[in-house]
Each structure stands twice: as structure tokens, then as C-alpha cells.
């Protein structure tokens, strides 16, 4: 990697991207096109030293861990699920705040020693229920988790809750908070050693516009 190559920053599409673009703009980084309105996946920016990738959240740590991206912005939920091997988690950006929670049909009884749990957060769910002495039979889904209790597929779900509207609209209630979630800035450990100047500068710019301490 040459010193001149732009720093590649992987962003998470969706809510995190919506909250992250204004932060980046305040840091002087504006993509050549609006990523949410484009089919492109790589974007040059107003800063020739920074290019952006726009990915699914679960893919952001994969790109960063393997060094295909130098840094990334991703939810704490994704990091908790995927682990942080090969990554530094350097800043809490304080954006895209939500909670990782368990939920079930409103008024449903407490599960016994075993519970069927539908989620895309397989590792987090297994760990959480194990810590309560409950064996979770995990049903892995990639979306629309809220349907699972309604149709009798699972007694509980583990999912992100923001406004709670999705749960309410489907007759579910939020139960236990597993973690408070917000978007984090992650950096590839090897890239930090190989190119400390541009990466430290990127972290400092994020720290300045979020008021967080690196
Ligand atoms: C998340 C989550 C819930 C919803 C919760 O999905 O899976 O379905 O948001 O938000 P609320 O509490 O404000 O209703 P998202 O729309 O982010 O899509 P995803 O399933 O692709 O993560």
C-alpha cells in the first residue's frame, strides 16, 4: 500500500449512513454522489485522501479485518456479534443509538430452561440466555424477526429496538436490554501500524466532530 493511496473507510448502509454523512461533511469529507441515491459501492470524496465504501453492517468488520478497508463505521451490535479480532475500536461516534433487546408476544410467560429464540444475532443471543441459565435453541433469520413469535416459530427474538414501533405494530413487547448500541469507528490493526499518520488524522477528525475522546 503506497503512502499516496487514499484511506478506505467502510460505512454501514441504512440508518448509520444517514447519521454518518452529516458527521463526515462536518469533517470535510463529502462523497462525489449521495451514496443512498446511487448504485455505486465505492465513492471518491471531496478529500482525495479518503474514499468510501458502502456495505451491509455485517460486512464492514470483514472488510476492515482483512485490510480491504482501512477503517469502518459500524454498530456495536455487529461488533459484539462478530468479535473484534484484528480491529481497534477507537471511537464511540454517538450516532445511530438504539438498544439490543429481547422481545416476545405481549403478556407471554417467561420461558423455561429452554427457549426458541429467533435472531440474526446468534452468538449474542446464545451468550445472553446462557448467562441466565436458559438454553437457547436459536433460529437464525436475516430480517423480519418480529414475525417469528406471531407465527409460533419462536418464543423470543433478539433484535435492535429504536422507537419500538416495529414491535408494537406486531403485538410484541420489548423485554430485556442486552446492550446499548451506537455506531463505532473501527480501524484495521495492521493498517494503523503501516500508515499511522492518515489513520490517526482520520480518527482525530471524527473525534473533533463528535466530541469523543480517542
Ligand atoms: C431494525 C430492527 C427492527 C427495527 C426496529 O431493522 O431489525 O426491525 O429496525 O426499529 P424501531 O424500534 O424504530 O421500529 P432495520 O429497519 O434497521 O433493518 P434491518 O432488518 O435490515 O436491520
Image (tube, rainbow, N blue to C red):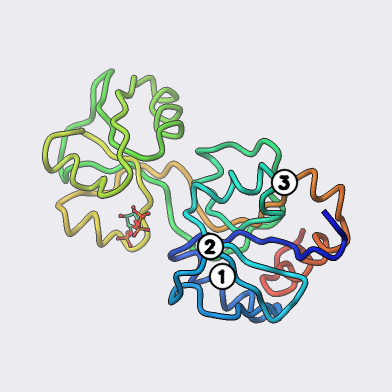
Residues packed near mark 1 inside 10 Å, few (<14), some (14 to 19) or many (20 plus): many
Looking at the image, tell me whether mark 1 or mark 3 is earlier in sequence order: 1
Provide the secondary structure element on which disc 2 rests. strand
- Find residue 4 and report its horizontal and vertical position in percent: 85, 65
What's the mark number on residue 20? 1
- Find residue 209 and report its horizontal and vertical position in percent: 69, 74
Above or below, 24 against 63 in this view is: below
Residues packed near mark 2 inside 10 Å, few (<14), some (14 to 19) or many (20 plus): many
Provide the secondary structure element on which disc 1 rests. helix
Is 197 left or right of 143, judged from the image as shown? Answer: right
- Ligand 1 position by quadrant: bottom left
Is 171 left or right of 198, judged from the image as shown? Answer: left
Beta carbon at label 1 within 8 Å of ligand 1 = no
Point out the frontmost of discs 2 and 1. Answer: 2
What's the mark number on residue 88? 3
Q: What residue is shown at x 43% (from left), y 52% (from top)?
A: 99
- Find residue 98 and report its horizontal and vertical position in percent: 44, 57
- C-alpha distance separating marks 2 and 1: 11 Å
- Find residue 198 and report its horizontal and vertical position in percent: 83, 63
Q: Which residue is mark 2?
A: 54
What's the mark number on residue 175? none
Amino acid at each position: 500500500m503506497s503512502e499516496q493511496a487514499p484511506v478506505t473507510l467502510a460505512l454501514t448502509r441504512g440508518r448509520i449512513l444517514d447519521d454518518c454523512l452529516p458527521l463526515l461533511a462536518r469533517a470535510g469529507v463529502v462523497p462525489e454522489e449521495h451514496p443512498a441515491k446511487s448504485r455505486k459501492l465505492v465513492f471518491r470524496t471531496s478529500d482525495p485522501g479518503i474514499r468510501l465504501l458502502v456495505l451491509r453492517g455485517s460486512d464492514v468488520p470483514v472488510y476492515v479485518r482483512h485490510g480491504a478497508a482501512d477503517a469502518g463505521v459500524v454498530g456495536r451490535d455487529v461488533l459484539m456479534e462478530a468479535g473484534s479480532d484484528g480491529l481497534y475500536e477507537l471511537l464511540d461516534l454517538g450516532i445511530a443509538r438504539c438498544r439490543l433487546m429481547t422481545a416476545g408476544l405481549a403478556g407471554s410467560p417467561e420461558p423455561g430452561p429452554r427457549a426458541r429464540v429467533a435472531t440474526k444475532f446468534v452468538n449474542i443471543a446464545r451468550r445472553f440466555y446462557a448467562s441466565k441459565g436458559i438454553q437457547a435453541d436459536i433460529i437464525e433469520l436475516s430480517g423480519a424477526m418480529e414475525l417469528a413469535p406471531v407465527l409460533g416459530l419462536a418464543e423470543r427474538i433478539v433484535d435492535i429496538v429504536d422507537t419500538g414501533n416495529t414491535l408494537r405494530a406486531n403485538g410484541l413487547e420489548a423485554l430485556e436490554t442486552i446492550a446499548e448500541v451506537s455506531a463505532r469507528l473501527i480501524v484495521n490493526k495492521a493498517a494503523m501500524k503501516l500508515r499511522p499518520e492518515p489513520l490517526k488524522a482520520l480518527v482525530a477528525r471524527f473525534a473533533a466532530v463528535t466530541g469523543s475522546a480517542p
